[in-house]
Image (cartoon, coloured by chain):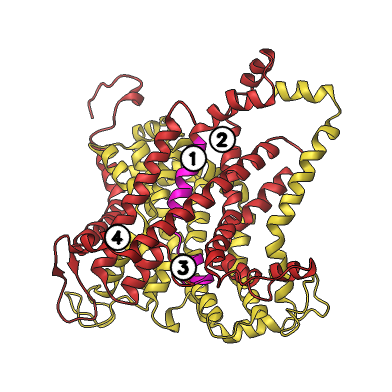
Chain colours: A yellow, B red
Amino acid sequence: MTALMARARRRPRSSRLWPRVMVLSVVTALVLLPFVWMTSLAFTPEGAAFSEVRLIPAQPTLENFATAMRVANLDTAFINSAVVTSIAVLTNCVIPVLAGYAFAHLPFRGSKVVFYVLISTAAIPVSVTLIPLFLMAKNFPLAGGNDLLGSGGSGLLDSLGGLMLPYLVGTMNIFLSRQYFAGMDRDFAEAARIDGASEFRIFSRIYLPMARPLIALVAVFSFTGVWDDFLWPLVVSTSERSTTVQLAITTFASTGNVKYGALMAATILVSIPVLVVFLVNQRGFISGLSEGGLKG
Amino acid sequence: MPTGAPPRPRRRRPHGKPALFGALFVVPAALYVAIFQLGPVLYGLVLSFTRYSPLSRSGPEFVGLDNYRSLYGDPEFGRAMLITGRYVLQVLPITVVIALGLALLSNRAFRGVGLFRTAMYVPHVVSLTAVSMIWLWIYSDDGVINQILDLLGMAGQRWLSTEDAALNAASAMRVWKALGSNMVLLLAGLQTVPKDLYEAARVDGANAWQQFRAVTLPGLRPMLTYVIAMDIIYLAQGFTEIFVLTQGGPYGSTTTVNFLIYTEAFQYNQMGSASAMAFVLFAFIAGLSIVAIRVGQGRRL
């Protein structure tokens, strides 16, 4: 920092900075341009969309949003995605966090090995587990008309249970949690232990309340990961009954003649939840992302 | 727990009751990962040695190494591997170089820098499905690129239905989408480079380029390696954007391995050979990222 300040003192700060501010502004504008077009198109009346590129439509309309809601099955998709995402966020805020805490503060025989085995699964490509998971969902015992051995019916295919199956524990969250708790002092636990507090109480009453930023991070990562996922719903959802938001916009796009105005409206509606979650938590989100790289 | 323990038991490994609870707290996560992550990997490996269609009455039929052997001579799979490799190699360097430039430019406190970082990050947060929808329109025959070309008096192109253009079109979109997250990570890396090293380099008379080579790059190496490895892992699994933009076409020119696996498994119901493809892709990704990490840890970048 001293070096930067020394340099800045030599010349007025503003004149040194304006070229980079200029470049960065242009880049920002270019990067955001597709979203501007998307928004503009979503408010342009159907038919007028292709006459010319306009940033602000001449006669803005909401009709595309109505079309999108009506044609793209967005209502079912929103309910399904909301249910699946909420449950996944909930389980991810408990199971991996608890495990991460144990890896950091309550090591047991072989805990290091267990930790590395669990973490290594994060590097497995999705396509390796996709087919087995599909077959496991299909042959899930006592679900969707299946018998105890998992045959006879369609199992968890085409159901909310099937949709949420691979999302419930994110291995990256175990890693993040261990890193976070490892940075906390163990003396609190020692003191509470001497006072006779149970291990679960020590976790839930002392460490968990101090780990709110971690929980926020895990929640945001899980939310965006599950909400944005496409490949798993694509294989496990076999009818409109179990469609998700990402699936709904792609089926809408592939129905013959694409109505781009309504498609952009649907895309906006589907993206709003993640954008809101990101903008509210952006500091934690970005620092959490960086942490994975710095420590990992 | 031994009684009469020293006053500061911090350094000791907890054992006895705390360790027991530690194991207990890990059980739910470990069980889940074992069943839904590790289990499927083993199951998939077994499947890759069988011929199996979920539609047939009979179960998987063991065929030994047949699936792998036939992949070796399969021109379709070979082509998909080449396309996947080309996809990674043409998106990765461009993204990383531009992201590094932007990280260097924004590694300075000035008004609006936070806004810039947030804006750059938006394409990363919006789903691949959603951004592919936007680019589907951008690349469409009456889309914005052709409109701009038209304004400039140039002929428009069929970006997604021409063999030469389609993969490049998808690549351009991935560069755009990956820029922000790469930049944010590299920026975090830049901020760990000790500032006094720059001062020392300047005292020694190093110019900006020499400072970059001697101080910035070595300090940034761990993060740069991480970014490149993550990019390889993501890009080599390209699927969603291909599904939305081109469906693998025209004439298979954008059929990545992941797209081929999907069609093989879920359109042709060949679970065995699709699993074999998945493991070859796994080996390919692992190999490529290990090379990247090795090079990243080497003396020269």
* Mark linked to residue A265: none
| Circle 4 crowding by C-alpha within 10 Å: few under 14, some 14–19, many from 20 | many
Q: Which of marks 1 and 3 is nearer the N terminus?
A: 3
Q: Give the prevailing secondary structure in the magenta stretch.
A: helix
Residue to which mark 4 is pinned? B36
For residue B242, side relative to residue A126 (left or right): right
| Circle 3 crowding by C-alpha within 10 Å: few under 14, some 14–19, many from 20 | many
Q: Is mark 2 on a helix, strand or loop?
A: helix
C-alpha span from label 4 to label 3: 18 Å
**Chain identity of mark 4:** B
Q: Is mark 4 on a helix, strand or loop?
A: helix
Q: Which kind of residue does numbered mark 3 sit on?
A: Phe
Residue B207 is situated, as x and y percent measured from the top left of the image, at 69, 22
Please check whether the numbered discs 2 and 3 fall on a single chain.
Answer: no
* Mark linked to residue B189: 2
Tag 4 and tag 2, C-beta contact below 8 Å: no
Residue to which mark 3 is pinned? A230
C-alpha span from label 4 to label 1: 26 Å
Tag 4 and tag 1, C-beta contact below 8 Å: no
Please state which of the two labelled residues, at mark 4 or mark 3, is closer to the viewer.
3
For residue A265, side relative to residue A170 (left or right): right
C-alpha span from label 2 to label 1: 8 Å
Q: Which kind of residue does numbered mark 2 sit on?
A: Gly
- Residue at 35% x, 45% y: name it: B287
Image quarter of residue A35: bottom right
Magenta-drawn segment:
B223-247
**Chain identity of mark 1:** A
- Residue at 59% x, 60% y: name it: B173
* Residue A275 visible in this rendered orientation of the protein: yes
A21 above or below B261?
Answer: above
For residue A108, side relative to residue A292 (left or right): left
Q: In this orientation, which residue lies closer to the viewer: A257 or A216?
A: A257
